[in-house]
Amino acid sequence: MYAFDFEKPTTVEAAVAALSDEDAQALSGGQTLIPTLKQRLAMPSKLVSLASIPELQGVCRNDAGQVCVGAATTHAAVASEVATAYPALAALAGNIGDPAVRNRGTIGGSVANNDPSACYPAAVLASGATLITNTREIPADTFFDGMFTTILDEGEILTEIRFPVPQAADYQKFVQPASRFALVGVFVANFAEGARVAVTGASNDGVFRWTEAEEALSANFSPDAINGLTVDAGDMIGDLHGTPEYRAHLVGVMTKRAVAAAS
Amino acid sequence: MAQVRMTINGQEIEAEVEPNRLLVELLREDLKLTGTHVGCDTSQCGACVVHVNGLAVKACTMLAIEAGGAEITTIEGIAAPDGTLSRVQQAFQDHHGLQCGFCTPGMVMTATKLLEQIPRPTEAEIRHHLEGNICRCTGYHNIVKAILAASGQDVSQLSAA
């Protein structure tokens, strides 16, 4: 690792101030950032730890019935604390990485990083969640902006994610066994207004909504509704773990499994 | 350099660390607690698992400076002060849950936390919980068996590896 300075503020305001330095970088659980630093793929002047800011921690239910998760809440905490309120989200969190990674990695870190194979972006997008920052509220549909990119500004801090709770939902991940990231992951959420389907791991543009499947499932929420639907392999990731055609096929398979398992 | 204080295996320590010092480097190189191993240094293998404030974490993927004020337990703190092995350690010995032994510290630290959370885990729960701990010798069979035995479950029907 290159050398850097370190700050551990206790309020969001102090963290924003600390991040105003040139090349300062927010550090949440560090489960992606620290390996990146070790490989010298990043050279921040300063790391600003978000781990000691109480308002970024924990889970609650607001008056609108949404499940509100503080951005610095670990995967392990989400897995246990939303198990009753939003079981599909809890199950997703409980299958990220491994137990030690889940004890450090955070929902805000994962979502802000927007790894194209990460699990959380699929839940955020399929749920139609709202992302709260220190300056604004952002709908999930506009937040993700391509592989490893979001519309967050420099120094803007994600503070909370608010999830509307669907009538039925499920996340199915086809695990890439070496990394335990999603080779393809599909989150299906069925609301009174219709179904939403978000796909991670598959596209060169990162997480996306599969609108044809949403229309079919909104009319008939059953695995059969997916029969005959395909996604274009031209936009899919191809690497040594799977070709674009393989990933495109898996999108349909995982969507059906998620619909079948949704509760 | 920054001053950090933490409690490691019940002992308060104070150390000077650069912000880019990893927790595992502080443990192994500065404090000579070499029971915590570095297998991959890329967060995959789990040989470096220690307990930080009661949670299993990979010491190669946490900065030492982040552990300021924390309570840390390493493999050196698992046996009783008189050397009596913990039930997990004893089960690994009884059921030959290791061959070269390099991954064993991380396995024991992860398994110890598993049994706190789930006192009588199923084989499937044990295997799920060990996903972040890689062993290149045993094929995991005797590790799973040792953890089942440590939880007080009968392993006499399981075949030998």
Image (spheres, rainbow, N blue to C red):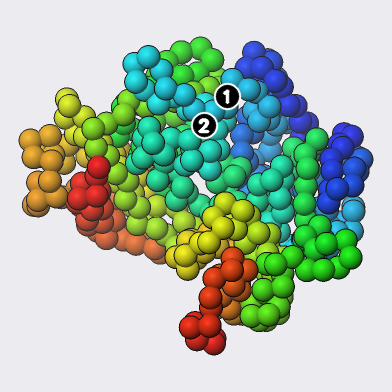
User: Which residue is the site of mark 2?
Assistant: A108
Answer left or right for A249 relative to B42.
left
**Which label sits on residue A56?**
1
Quadrant for the C terminus of chain A in the image: top left
Looking at this view, is B115 or B36 the one in front? B115
- Give coordinates of residue A52: x percent, y percent: 68, 27
Q: Identify the image quadrant of residue B78.
A: bottom right
Q: Is residue A219 above or below residue B29?
A: above
Q: Residue at x 61, y 42 (%)?
A: A104
Q: Earlier in the sequence, mark 1 or mark 2?
A: 1
| Residue type for callout 2 | Gly
| Residue type for callout 1 | Leu
Q: Chain of mark 1?
A: A
What separation in Å lies between label 1 and label 2 (alpha carbons)? Answer: 9 Å
Looking at this view, is B94 or A259 the one in front? B94
Answer left or right for B144 relative to A200.
right
Looking at this view, is A91 or A151 the one in front? A91
Q: Residue at x 27, y 31 (%)?
A: A166
Residue A152 visible: no
Q: Residue at x 31, y 29 (%)?
A: A165
- Give coordinates of residue B11: x percent, y percent: 89, 47
Q: Is residue B132 above or below residue A24?
A: below
- Give coordinates of residue B12: x percent, y percent: 90, 43
